[in-house]
C-alpha cells in the first residue's frame, strides 16, 4: 500500500456500505478500496454500522419450514468452497480485480476509442444511469471537459495528474462536484490512465430552462 | 487487561437456545452484540465441522432479522422469505471467509444480506473490492478478535445514544431512502476507534501473507 493521499468521502463509503450507490460509482469505490487499506478500514467500519442495524432490527418470523428449506438448499450446493479470488493475476497488473472484471483483463485488454488530442476513452458497461469510463491522457495534456456538471470521481491508475487540489498519483481519487472548476493536467511523462465516474446529467438546469420557460409557461 | 480475559473465558454455549426462541416472538431490545462471542464460535463450528445445530442457532437469531431488514429495504414478504433463506445458506458456504478480527457476525450477516438485496431488489451488479488473500494460515489473532468485539459493542452503544434525528438519517441511508448526494459529508458517526482496529487487523493480515 503505497502513498495514497486523496481518499473517498464518508458519504460515498457509507452509501457503498449500505448498498445504495450506483454501479458506476461502486466500481470506482471498489477499485480504490482494493488499493487503499485506509479506505477499506473506513468501509468496514461503515459496514459495522450496518451490523448494528441488523442487531437492532425488529424480527419477522419465517415460515415453519424455513430452516429445513435452507438445509435442503445447502445440500444442493456444490461441495467445493469458493476460494477467495481465483483469477490469475500478476504482480505487475495495473488494474485491481474489480476493474479487471469490467475490462475483461488488464490494461492491454482495454478497447480504446480516440476522442481527439491524443486522448482516448473506453466507456465500461454498467447498469443504472451513472457512467464510468477509462481515460488515457498523454503526459502534459489537459484532461478534456466532458461537459459534466454533477458529481465526478476520478481515480488514477497509472501516471499522474495535477490540478488546484494538488498532485494525484496511482490510487489517488478526486471527488469533484459542480462547484469546483478544476483543470486537471496529466503530469509530463507517461500517459495518465484514469477511471472516471459521473452521475446522470442534470437536465433543465442553467441556460435551457431560462429559454424554455416563456414557451412552457412555467 | 485482566477483565477482558475474564469475559473471554465465559463458557461458550452459555445461552443455548433461549434467545433464539424468544427472538421469533418478540421485538427484542437487548443488545445482541453481547452474544457475538457465541455467534463467532457457531460460525467456526459450521466452518470446521459442518455443524447443523450451530447453524440452526445462527438461523434462529439472524434469519428473522434479515427478513425484517429486507422488508424494510422494500422487499415484499415472499421475496424477503426466499432471499433470507439464500442469505443464510450463503453464510454456511462462506463460513471460511469470515474474519472475526475485522467484523462481528452481525456485520458479516449484514454484508451478505446487503449483497443479496442489491442483486434481487436493485437488479444490479455489485463490484466488490479485491479479496485479501486469507486462509487458515492467517487465522486471526485472538486479541484482535476480542478488541473488535469490544469496539462493536461500543459502537452499538454510541449509536443508541445518538440524537433521534441523526439515528433516523442513518437508518434511512442504510434502508435505501437517501442517495449519496443526500448523505451529509460529515456523518457524525463515532467510527474512529473501530476503524483503527480494523486497520490494524488488515496490517497484520498483509504482514502474515508476506
Image (cartoon, helix red, strand yellow):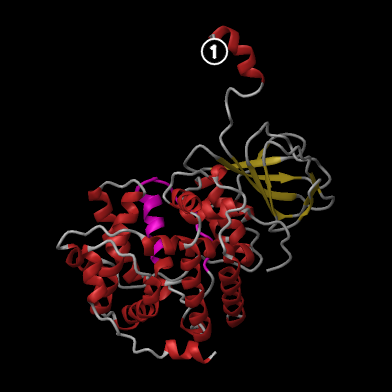
Q: Position of residue A129 (x, y in %)?
A: 51, 37
Residue in the image at 56% along x and 72% along y: B198
Q: Is residue B49 above or below residue A1?
A: below
Label 1 is found on which chain of the structure?
A
Residue B130 part of the magenta-drawn span: yes
Q: Is residue B91 above or below residue A104?
A: below
The boundaries of the magenta stretch are B109-131
Where does label 1 land, which residue? Answer: A218
Residue sitting at the far left: A64
Q: Residue B148 versus residue A187: which sits nearer the camera?
A: B148
Q: Position of residue B108 (x, y in %)?
A: 42, 67
Residue B200 in the figure: left or right of residue B38: right
Residue in the image at 32% along x and 82% along y: B45
Q: Is residue A20 above or below residue A150?
A: below
- Which image quarter is the C terminus of chain B in? bottom right
Q: Residue B72 versus residue A111: which sits nearer the camera?
A: B72
Q: How many marks do you count on the picture?
A: 1
Q: Position of residue B9 (x, y in %)?
A: 41, 91
Q: State the SS at label 1.
A: loop
Q: Could you tell me if residue A103 is visible in this image?
A: no
Residue A81 in the figure: left or right of residue A95: left
Q: Position of residue A186 (x, y in %)?
A: 79, 47
Q: Is residue B201 above or below residue A105?
A: below
Alpha-carbon neighbours of circle 1 within 10 Å: few (<14), some, or many (≥20)? few
Q: Could you tell me if residue A209 is visible in this image?
A: yes
Q: Residue A34 versus residue B100: which sits nearer the camera?
A: B100
Residue in the image at 58% along x and 29% along y: A202
Residue A110 part of the magenta-drawn span: no
Amino acid at each position: 500500500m503505497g502513498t495514497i493521499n486523496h481518499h473517498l468521502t464518508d458519504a460515498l463509503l457509507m452509501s457503498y456500505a449500505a448498498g445504495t450507490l450506483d454501479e458506476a460509482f461502486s466500481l470506482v469505490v471498489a477499485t480504490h478500496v482494493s488499493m487503499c487499506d485506509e479506505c477499506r478500514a473506513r468501509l468496514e467500519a461503515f459496514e459495522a454500522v450496518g451490523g448494528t442495524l441488523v442487531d437492532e432490527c425488529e424480527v419477522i418470523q419465517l415460515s415453519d419450514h424455513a430452516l429445513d428449506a435452507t438445509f435442503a438448499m445447502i445440500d444442493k450446493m456444490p461441495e467445493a468452497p469458493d476460494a477467495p479470488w481465483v483469477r490469475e493475476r500478476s504482480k505487475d497488473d495495473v488494474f485491481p480485480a474489480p476493474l479487471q472484471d469490467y475490462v475483461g483483463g488488464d490494461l492491454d485488454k482495454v478497447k480504446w476509442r480516440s476522442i481527439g488530442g491524443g486522448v482516448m476513452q473506453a466507456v465500461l458497461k454498467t447498469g443504472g444511469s451513472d457512467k464510468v469510463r477509462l481515460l488515457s491522457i498523454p503526459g502534459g495534456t489537459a484532461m478534456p471537459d466532458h461537459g459534466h456538471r454533477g458529481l465526478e470521481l476520478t481515480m488514477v491508475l497509472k501516471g499522474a495528474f495535477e490540478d488546484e487540489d494538488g498532485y494525484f498519483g496511482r490510487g489517488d481519487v478526486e471527488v469533484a462536484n459542480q462547484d469546483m472548476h478544476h483543470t486537471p493536467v496529466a503530469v509530463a511523462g507517461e500517459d495518465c490512465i484514469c477511471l472516471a465516474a459521473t452521475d446522470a446529467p442534470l437536465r433543465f438546469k442553467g441556460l435551457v430552462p431560462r429559454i424554455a420557460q416563456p414557451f412552457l409557461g412555467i | 487487561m485482566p477483565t477482558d480475559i475474564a469475559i473471554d473465558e465465559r463458557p461458550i454455549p452459555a445461552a443455548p437456545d433461549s434467545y433464539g426462541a424468544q427472538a421469533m416472538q418478540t421485538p427484542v431490545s437487548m443488545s445482541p452484540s453481547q452474544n457475538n462471542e457465541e455467534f463467532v464460535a457457531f460460525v467456526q463450528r459450521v466452518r470446521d465441522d459442518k455443524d447443523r445445530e450451530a447453524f440452526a442457532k445462527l438461523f434462529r437469531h439472524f434469519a428473522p432479522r434479515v427478513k425484517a431488514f429486507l422488508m424494510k429495504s422494500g422487499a415484499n414478504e415472499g421475496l424477503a422469505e426466499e432471499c433470507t433463506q439464500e442469505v443464510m445458506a450463503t453464510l454456511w458456504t462462506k463460513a471460511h471467509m469470515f474474519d472475526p478480527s475485522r467484523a462481528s457476525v452481525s456485520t458479516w450477516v449484514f454484508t451478505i444480506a446487503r449483497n443479496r438485496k442489491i442483486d434481487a431488489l436493485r437488479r444490479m451488479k455489485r463490484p466488490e473490492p479485491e479479496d485479501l488473500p486469507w486462509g487458515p494460515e492467517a487465522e486471526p489473532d485472538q486479541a484482535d478478535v476480542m478488541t473488535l468485539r469490544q469496539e462493536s459493542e461500543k459502537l452499538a452503544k454510541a449509536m443508541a445514544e445518538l440524537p433521534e434525528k441523526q439515528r433516523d438519517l442513518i437508518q434511512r441511508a442504510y434502508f435505501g431512502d437517501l442517495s449519496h448526494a443526500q448523505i451529509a459529508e460529515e456523518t457524525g458517526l463515532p467510527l474512529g476507534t473501530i476503524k483503527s482496529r480494523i486497520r490494524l487487523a488488515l496490517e497484520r493480515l498483509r504482514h502474515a501473507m508476506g
